[in-house]
Image (cartoon, rainbow, N blue to C red):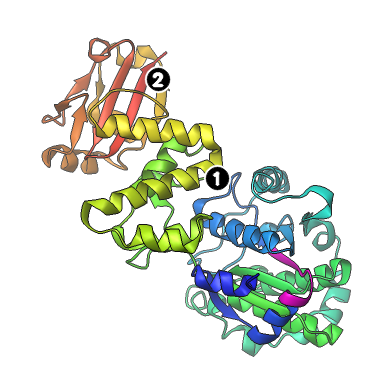
């Protein structure tokens, strides 16, 4: 059986690894406990998190033991990595709720039965730390000069970096030490934007415990233009079906750039690599078959086969000019809002199809908005109850984005 490190390399996940040959040998010899942290900044995981989940899944299937570390403590501070401003501060109650939702979602993908994986929360040890003792044991091992050279801090120095955020690296590093001591955890993994924090924890454990532990980062999910994937005009692509419907997830992946097909098939599905390469080699209009496989496989993994079938059926019906609702995004609006008519620009903004009236006017001027099969030419158009068919109205933006309005 191939080493899981080689599998992760082949699928394009790995960015940086400490002592790669040593780690490969360790992963061959024994079941290694590893961890990945999830700061509970929202009540759902995102498509970006799905890469981390897939890495955990590959590692577990290779016989290694994942620890999903929920950041109930670190989220109270907020990681400054990649942020131009200080994170919005959440209450402990909000963070606890978000962490609970993360645990529920992770359980859909990772096997936590019979001690095959663990979920722990760093609030259990960070919230009760003695400040002076913490500084004496942990703080003495950190050089401020070196910390200031870390990418996660450098970009914040001009605008101002609070000591509040500056302490984040110490706390994340302490997490690794705690998990090493309590669970014999010997590997921390995370996104490439976490390299500074992960490396600090790895060095702390090696220094204090005088033992060999390891660190690994994987590539972030970015498109061919280098921008993070998982964002649309209407917002983030969430794994929670109440926040992003299975149909929206399917359509997002079905419509990715041709250049991103191989990367997404490799990182977001469990398809064998010979099949990934075969699908990715398709050219012209044929590449759409690969995108359909990608969209279906990811939707099936996240939401189940039944929802994936519904999303696929709805997408095909719309592509063929049909009117099947399937799992098309639908918004219910009280009928009274249309008694005197609602402006098309206001309606599109309310539905999240546009971010402003000016964007709506531009789309209408370009001929990109349709009500049913009819193109909208007038930005002052008012939608009235009489325009609804069986209390339903379909709006299309461009060729592929559909949204159904339902009167209640």
State the residue in front, 168 or 89: 168
- Percent across and percent down for residue 277 are 40, 63
Nearest-to-viewer mark from 1 and 2? 1
In the picture, the disc for residue 333 is 2
Label 2 residue SS: strand
Left or right, 114 with reference to 290: right
Q: Residue at x 70, y 88 (%)?
A: 143
Identify the residue under disc 1. 301
Q: Can you give x and y, in whole percent of width and height, for residue 159 in the image?
A: 48, 73
Q: Residues within 10 Å of mark 1 (few under 14, many from 20)?
A: some
**Quarter where residue 358 is shown:** top left
Q: CA distance from mark 1 to mark 2?
A: 31 Å
Q: Is residue 56 left or right of residue 81?
A: right
Q: Which residues are magenta?
A: 27-36
Quadrant position of the C terminus in the picture = top left
Q: Quadrant of the N terminus?
A: bottom right
The magenta stretch spans residue 125: no
- What residue do we see at 77% from left, 56% from top? 117
The reply to whether residue 48 is in sight is yes
Residue 221 is at least partly visible in this image: no
N-term-proximal mark, 1 vs 2: 1
Query: Residue 77 at x, y = what percent?
Result: 67, 61
Residue 174: numbered disc: none
Q: Indicate whether 377 appears above or below 183.
A: above
In the structure shown, which secondary structural element does the residue marked by tag 1 occupy?
helix
Answer above or below: position of 58 versus 211.
Answer: above
Q: Residue 54, relative to residue 407: is it above or below?
A: below
Identify the residue shown where x is 67% and y is 57%: 75
Which residue is at the front of the view, 402 or 286? Answer: 286
Q: Position of residue 106 (x, y in %)?
A: 66, 48
Residue appearing at x 15%, y 37% in the figure: 364
Front-most of 304 and 89? Answer: 304
């Amino acid at each position: 059986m191939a080493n899981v490190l080689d599998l992760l390399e082949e699928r394009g996940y790995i960015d940086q690894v400490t002592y790669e040959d040593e780690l490969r040998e360790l992963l061959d010899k024994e079941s290694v406990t590893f961890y990945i942290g999830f700061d509970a900044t929202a009540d759902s995981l995102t498509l970006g998190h799905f890469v981390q989940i897939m890495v955990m899944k590959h590692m577990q299937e290779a016989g290694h033991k994942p620890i999903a570390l929920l950041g109930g403590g670190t989220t109270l501070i907020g990681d400054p990595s990649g942020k131009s401003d200080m994170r919005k501060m959440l209450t402990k109650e909000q963070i606890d709720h978000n962490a609970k939702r993360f645990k529920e979602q992770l359980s859909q993908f990772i096997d936590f039965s019979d001690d095959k994986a663990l979920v722990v929360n760093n609030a259990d040890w960070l919230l009760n730390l003695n400040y002076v003792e913490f500084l004496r044991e942990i703080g003495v091992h950190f050089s401020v000069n070196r910390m200031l050279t870390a990418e996660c801090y450098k970009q914040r120095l001009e605008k101002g970096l609070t000591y509040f955020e500056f302490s984040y690296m110490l706390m994340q590093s302490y997490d690794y030490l705690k998990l090493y001591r309590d669970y014999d955890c010997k590997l921390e993994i995370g996104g490439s934007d976490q390299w500074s924090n992960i490396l600090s924890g790895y060095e702390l454990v090696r220094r204090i415990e005088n033992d060999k532990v390891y660190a690994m980062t994987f590539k972030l999910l970015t498109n061919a233009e280098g921008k993070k994937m998982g964002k649309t005009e209407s917002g983030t692509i969430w794994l929670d079906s109440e926040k992003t419907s299975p149909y929206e997830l399917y359509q997002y992946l079905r419509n990715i750039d041709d250049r991103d097909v191989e990367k997404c098939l490799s990182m977001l599905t469990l398809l064998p690599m010979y099949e990934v390469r075969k699908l990715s080699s398709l050219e012209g209009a044929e590449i759409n078959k690969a995108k359909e496989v990608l969209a279906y496989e990811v939707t099936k993994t996240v939401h189940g086969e039944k929802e994936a079938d519904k999303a696929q059926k709805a997408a095909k019906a719309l592509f063929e000019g049909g009117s099947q609702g399937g799992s098309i995004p639908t918004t219910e609006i009280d009928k009274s809002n249309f008694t005197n008519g609602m402006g098309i620009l206001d309606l599109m903004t309310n539905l999240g199809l546009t971010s402003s009236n000016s964007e709506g006017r531009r789309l209408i001027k370009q001929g990109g908005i349709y009500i049913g099969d009819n193109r909208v030419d007038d930005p002052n158009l008012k939608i009235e109850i009489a325009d609804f068919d069986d209390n339903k109205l379909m709006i299309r933006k461009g060729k592929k984005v559909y949204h159904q309005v339902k009167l209640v």
